[in-house]
Image (cartoon, rainbow, N blue to C red):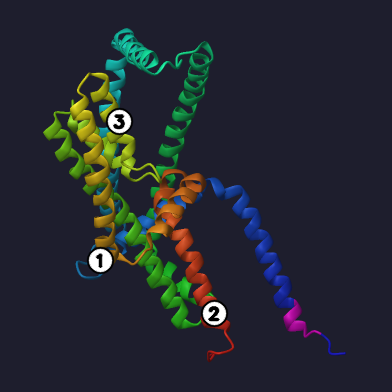
Amino acid sequence: MNSIPNNAIRQLLLLILILLIGYVLFIYLKTFLPAFLGAYTLYVLMRKYMFILQGKHKWNKNLAAALLMLLSFLIIMVPILVFANMMTSRVAWAINHSSEILTSIKNFIAQYERKYEIQILTDENIKRISTMAAETLPKILGATFETLTTILIMYFILYFMLVDGRKMESHFYEWVPLKDENILLLRRELNMLVNSNAIGIPLIALIQGLVALIGYVILGVDKPIFWFVITCIAAMLPVVGAAAAYIPISVVFFANGATGKGIIMMIYGLGVIGVSDNVFRFWLQKKLGDVHPLITVFGVIIGVSMFGFIGLIFGPILISLFLLMIKIYANEFSPNKPHQ
C-alpha cells in the first residue's frame, strides 16, 4: 500500500486548523459582518479616487482617506437625516392630532363595514394591533442604535482599507490559491457587482421616486416631497417596492371621498411607476453590469434577512458570487481545460 506523503498530511492538518480558527473568528465577529461589507462596498467605489489623489496629486494618504470618508458620509447621512427630520415632524403632528386621526380611521372603516357587511374593528383585532405596536417600537429603537454602531465600525474599517489599499490587494493576489486569470476574473466581477448594486439599486429607486413625484404633484398629493422620499426608500425593498407608497396614497384619496384621484393614483402607480422600474433596470444593466432581475429580487430578500439594510446591496452580490465561484471552479479543475 502506498503511504500518504508527510507533506500532504501537514497540508491537510494546516487547512483544518485554518478552518477551525476561521470558524471561531466568524462566530464571534459575525455581528461586524454588515460593517465589513459596507466598508468593502465603499472601498470599491472610492478606490480609483484614492489612488488618483495619492498618485497624481501626491496627497498624503491619511488626508486623502479622510476627505473621501467625509464626502461619502455626507452623501449617505444627509438623506438619512432629512428623512429622519421629515418623519419626526410627521410623527409629532400625528401625536398632536391622534384623536382626530383615530376618529377619521374609525369612520372610514365603519363605512366599509356597513357597505360590505363585514366586521373589521373587533376587540380581538384592536388587541392584536396594540400588541404589534408595542412590540415594534422597541425593535425600531434597537435597529436604529444598531445601524449607528454599524456605520461607526464601517468607517473605522474603511479607513484602514483606504490607507493600506495597495498592500491589501497585493496580499489578496498572493494568498488566494487560484490561477492568475481567475484571480483577475474574481476581482473584476466583484468590482462590477458592487458598482452595479451599490449604484444601480439606489439610482433606480431615485428614478422611480422622481417618476412618482410627477404624479403626486399633478394629483395634488399632500406633502409630495415626503411621499417622494418614502417612495425612494420603498422602491429598494423586495417584492412590494414602490407600491408601499402609492397604495396608501390611493387609500387616503378613497378615504377623503376623492375616488377619481384614488383610481388614477392606482393606475399611475401600477402602469407608470411600476413599469419605470423594469425599463430603467434594463438600461442600467447594460451600463453597469449584466445582473439578472431574478438575482436582484431573490438576493435582496436573502440579503435583508442576513445583513439588514446593507443586504439590499450585498444579497444580490452573494448570489452572483456563488455563481461566479462555480464558474471559477470549473475553470480551475475541469478535466477538459488545460491547467497551469
Residue beneath label 2, please? 330
Q: Nearer the viewer, residue 173 or 339?
A: 339
For image coordinates 73% across by 71% down, the residue present is: 13
The amino acid type of the residue labelled 2 equals Ala
Q: Nearer the viewer, residue 168 or 150?
A: 150
Q: Nearer the viewer, mark 1 or mark 3?
A: 1
Question: SS at mark 1?
Answer: helix
**Quick check: marks 2 and 3 in contact, CB under 8 Å?**
no
- In the rendered structure, does residue 155 fall within the stretch colored magenta? no
What x and y, as percent, mark residue 105?
34, 15
Q: CA distance from mark 1 to mark 3?
A: 32 Å
Q: Residue at x 46, y 34 (%)?
A: 143
Q: Nearer the viewer, mark 2 or mark 3?
A: 2
Give the residue number, with chain letter if any, for mark 1. Answer: 287
Q: Can residue 37 be seen in this snapshot?
A: no
Left or right: 271 as drawn, with respect to 159: left
Residue marked by disc 3: 84
Q: Which residues are magenta?
A: 4-9
- The residue drawn where x is 44% and y is 82% is 181
Mark 3 lies on a secondary structure that is helix
Q: Is residue 6 magenta?
A: yes
Q: Residue 14: image x %, image y %? A: 69, 71
Crowding around mark 2 (Cα neighbors within 10 Å: few <14, some 14 to 19, many 20+) is: few
Which structural element holds mark 2?
Answer: helix
Q: Residue furthest left?
A: 218
